[in-house]
Amino acid sequence: IKRKVDNNNTWSSWSGSTEDPRKRAFGFLHDTLGFQGKTREFLDITTPWRDNQDTKNVSKEDEEERLRNNRAMVMLEDLPDSVKAAIEHVCQLFSEAIPKELQPILKYSNLIAAQPNLHCGRTLLPIHVDHPRKDGFGIVIITIGIARSGTILLIKAAREAAMKMQVPERHAYMLSDKARDSCAHGVLAIDDDGLRESLNLRFGLHDFAMPGLPLILTQRVLKYWEQTTPQETEKH
């Protein structure tokens, strides 16, 4: 993914701001749900919860960000079998840690996108919620530390509780069920150089009917944030 995006110089910013040096892109892998055109048409990869956002009309800011994110999408057809095997292995490692209802989703075939995140000199990816119908799509999200270590910060909705955990380089963690739905999260790079890189594997889509899979609604996430927005969580 990095090579293709680097060659085309089509990275998008992590936060949606053109002044943000942090980068991200989206890779759609062959033989996955995300590789299908109808799936990508369902995606609206823009930053959620903008101030004064009009949900009925697309703002110029949203449209420009959507175009930048579309340019950061790459199709990956000719991948070695080892890539699929590695992702399947990761799915198997985590499958027993999620509710049975969600276990069928955690398969290579249900991968929507592989999303690299580059800190690019910034130590912090601020506290945020992955909005399921915007740029935080994915019912189950596995993040692999590619380069450098990081501290994962989790804050429960309404600031009821908080925790942190270290994720060393080449280790992985998963956000699913209540950890994905009712917690905001952020990442603080342990090394001061801010060169941490990670890879999100996003499986399944909310509100998207998939044969043989449970229909998981967006409201499953948003119900926790009706009174407390992610911005308010971050300020505290």
Image: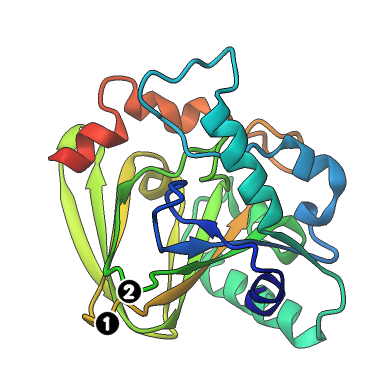
Mark 1 surroundings within 10 Å by alpha-carbon count, few (fewer than 14), some (14 through 19), many (20 or more): few
Q: CA distance from mark 1 to mark 2?
A: 6 Å
Q: Residue at x 58, y 75 (%)?
A: 90
Task: Tell me, for residue 121, which label it has, or none.
Answer: 2
Of the pair 180 and 190, the residue shown nearer to us: 190
Residue 128 appears at what percent x and percent y?
A: 34, 45
Q: Secondary structure at mark 1?
A: loop
Q: Residue at x 29, y 29 (%)?
A: 229
Q: Secondary structure at mark 2?
A: loop
State left or right for residue 20 relative to residue 39: left
State left or right for residue 71 relative to residue 57: right
Of the pair 19 and 173, the residue shown nearer to us: 19
Of the pair 196 and 67, the residue shown nearer to us: 67
Specify the quadrant that holds the N terminus.
bottom right
State left or right for residue 181 relative to residue 203: left
State left or right for residue 12 relative to residue 19: right
Residue 198 appears at what percent x and percent y?
A: 46, 73
Q: Is residue 204 visible?
A: no
Identified by mark 1, the residue type is Asp
Q: Residue at x 21, y 38 (%)?
A: 233
Asked where in the image residue 122 lies, by quadrant, the reply is bottom left
Looking at the image, do the residues carrying marks 1 and 2 touch, with CB atoms under 8 Å apart? yes
Identified by mark 2, the residue type is Gly
Asked where in the image residue 153 lies, by quadrant, the reply is bottom left
Task: Tell me, for residue 193, which label it has, or none.
Answer: 1
Residue 121 appears at what percent x and percent y?
A: 32, 74
- Residue at the top extreme? 56
Asked where in the image residue 49 lies, by quadrant, the reply is top left
Q: Residue at x 77, y 61 (%)?
A: 109
Specify the quadrant that holds the C terminus.
top left
